[in-house]
Amino acid sequence: MSASVWRAELQKQLLLLALLWLFLLWLLDDGVWALNLTLLFYIAWNLRQLYKVNRWLVEGGKLKQTPESKGLWEHLIQQMYQTQQTNRMRKQRLAKVLKRFHRSLEAIPDATILLHNHGEIEWANQAASHLLNIQNPHDHGQRIDNLIRDPAFHDYIHRGDFSHSLDIPSPVMNQVELNIRIVPFGEGHLLTVRDVSDFQRLQSVRREFVANVSHELRTPLTVIRGYVEALNDDPLPAESQQGVRAIQRQTLRMQEIVNDLLTLSRLEMEPLDLQEEWLDVPVLLESLCEDARRLSAQRQHVIQLSCQPLRLLGNRAELNSLFSNLIYNAVQHTPEGCCIFVKWCAEGEAVRFSVRDKGVGIEAQNLSRLTERFYRVDAGRSRDKGGTGLGLSIVKHILTRHGSHLEIESQRGQGSTFACSFSAERVSALAALGGRA
Ligand code: ADP
């Protein structure tokens, strides 16, 4: 109601009250009684209006039932009705949006579940019932970890680190693999589940294919190598000698590639329960650095080793391959005379292994792809140096199996650091286990 309307209405009411007071004064001939009766009448009238408005509101505030009023009350009721209408329309619009949102989530073939802050189900779509047997609305309010009882899922939910997705077998269907992803959503979370069985099957076919091909190539390569070596022993005409040596070099290279491919296949296919033992890392690194110096030979790299007396729990062959790949890479991919620092030291809660070199470095755009199979910054140079392009891929897999990951820092012209950290549970002081202090 505008101020001018309000003022006019107020003046009208005051005028009416004054008229009433004058009438009562004329009737009773007593000013105070006339005023008392006028005020009493005014209060009673207002109370009656209030009662009518309250009853109207209680009955739903419908237009048909709007109480009959005059003056200020009429304006007030109109205002209330309008506000109520606006709120009603807003609510309807919101309900429509919510319905549309739910319908679009229903249309998604992946299971989609809205979770409250503590993991209670707020809403789930149709696919959630198919993939996880979560029923809408029957399971609303149930905690998600009470319905999906896979231990890996429990760990995942309680750790609260949702930066990576999780693969688990479906709790309701045999041979169905699910990929679970959780993202923050409002106050709670949005959990999506995708059937990745086909993708997993494809991956396993690929893995088996590579493993089988590598395995099949192994025997013929060994035979070829044997014959070539025998040929090399015999005196050959000069023009043939060059050819035989080239065959020998390439056979050796192929054997190395096949061996690396087989190692990768084993790492991908073998279960995670490794044969683990406590490894005296300083002794292992000392011998690897010695080998690296021999590998460097004429190129005279300066290799410095700095170790703390700490043991590591892991698979001996795999850790040996991990450390040697990173150390030998520093020798293979840096110019002669380059300094290489190998470090095995505690850092906060974890223990870190790093190989830092002051070599050529790697451009930023190559860093994220270095662990891909056969990815080399300079393919020609890598091949010349006998690289298979599989070393860092192997390193990545080994680290994953030991609960770690590869960190690469590099700048063109400044050198590179390849590092990884192991959690405190995997490490112990050498002295504590009766080894070297
Ligand atoms: P390769 O058999 O070629 O060494 P890797 O998978 O071990 O294969 O390494 C992939 C590529 O990463 C290498 O070809 C090389 O270009 C690059 N690289 C690895 N280590 C270093 C390093 N210390 N300095 C510079 N480049 C490196």
Image (cartoon, rainbow, N blue to C red):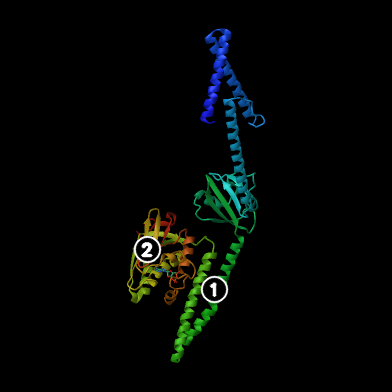
Residue 34 in picture, x, y percent from top left: 55, 11
Tell me the crowding category of disc 1: few under 14, some 14 to 19, or many 20 or more residues within 10 angstroms, Cα based: many
Measuring from the top left, give residue 401's x and y in whole percent. Answer: 49, 61
Residue 350 is left or right of residue 156, and the answer is left
Classify residue 209 as left or right of residue 240.
right
Q: In which quarter of the image is the N terminus?
A: top right
Q: In this view, does 368 lie above or below 59?
A: below
- The quarter of the image that holds ligand 1 is bottom left
On residue 282, the disc is: 2
At x 60% / y 32%, what residue is drawn? 81
Q: Quadrant of the C terminus?
A: bottom left
Q: Label 2: how many residues lie within 10 Å, few (<14), some (14-19) or many (20+)?
A: many
Whether residue 329 is visible, yes or no, is yes
Task: Name the residue nearer the viewer: 204 or 278.
Answer: 204
Q: Nearer the viewer, residue 363 or 306?
A: 363
Q: Name the residue under label 1.
A: 214
Instruction: Residue 141: tell me if it is visible.
Output: no
Q: Within the image, what quadrant is residue 122 found in?
A: top right
Q: In this view, does 265 lie to the left or right of 65?
A: left
Q: How far apart are marks 2 and 1 (CA)?
A: 34 Å
Amino acid at dot 1: Ser
Pick the front one: 36 or 251: 36
Query: Which residue appears at 63% of the width and 28% of the height?
Result: 56
Q: Which of marks 2 and 1 is nearer the N terminus?
A: 1
Q: Nearer the viewer, residue 428 or 250?
A: 250
